[in-house]
Image: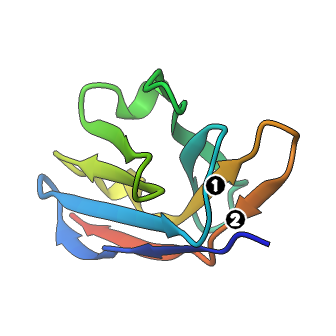
Amino acid sequence: QVQLMESGGGLVQAGGSLRLSCGASGNIYGAMGWYREAPGKQRELVATISRGGYETYTDSVKGRFTISRDSVKNTVYLQMNNLKPEDTGVYFCNARQLMGSEYWGPGTQVTVSS
């Protein structure tokens, strides 16, 4: 069973930046990504990256967030710039294997003050 652990969350003022990291305890052969859950809202996809480096983003973060991946270290990053209060939430790391297994991290809190 692969375990994921996020780090890098915190409190930041609007317009600031944070970098999230997520390390996996084993090799990940499928996509890795980030989801977030705001208070009272459903968990939503933020960004994903394939093992080959193909990136996708939800519209609200395009141009502000950048996802990257180190497949040797089995680590995925999320660089978040120009943060807005609506980016506040718990950010979860997600990883998938080619045969369908899926893993989640426990989450890291990101709070953006106005």
Figure colour scheme: rainbow
Q: Residue at 62% of width from left, 50% of height from top? A: 28
What kind of residue is marked 2?
Answer: Trp
* Residue 24 location (% of width, % of height): 55, 66
Q: Secondary structure at mark 1?
A: strand
Q: Seen in the image, is 19 located left or right of residue 44?
A: left
Mark 2, other Cα within 10 Å: few <14 / some 14–19 / many ≥20 = many
Quarter assignment of residue 29: top right
Q: Which mark is residue 104?
A: 2
* Residue 31 location (% of width, % of height): 62, 38
* Residue 45 location (% of width, % of height): 61, 41
Look at the picture and state if 45 lies above or below 107: above
Q: Residue at 62% of width from left, 65% of height from top? A: 26
Q: Which mark is residue 52?
A: none
Q: Residue at 66% of width from left, 74% of height from top? A: 3
Which quadrant is home to the N terminus?
Answer: bottom right
Quarter assignment of residue 104: bottom right
Residue tagged 1: 94
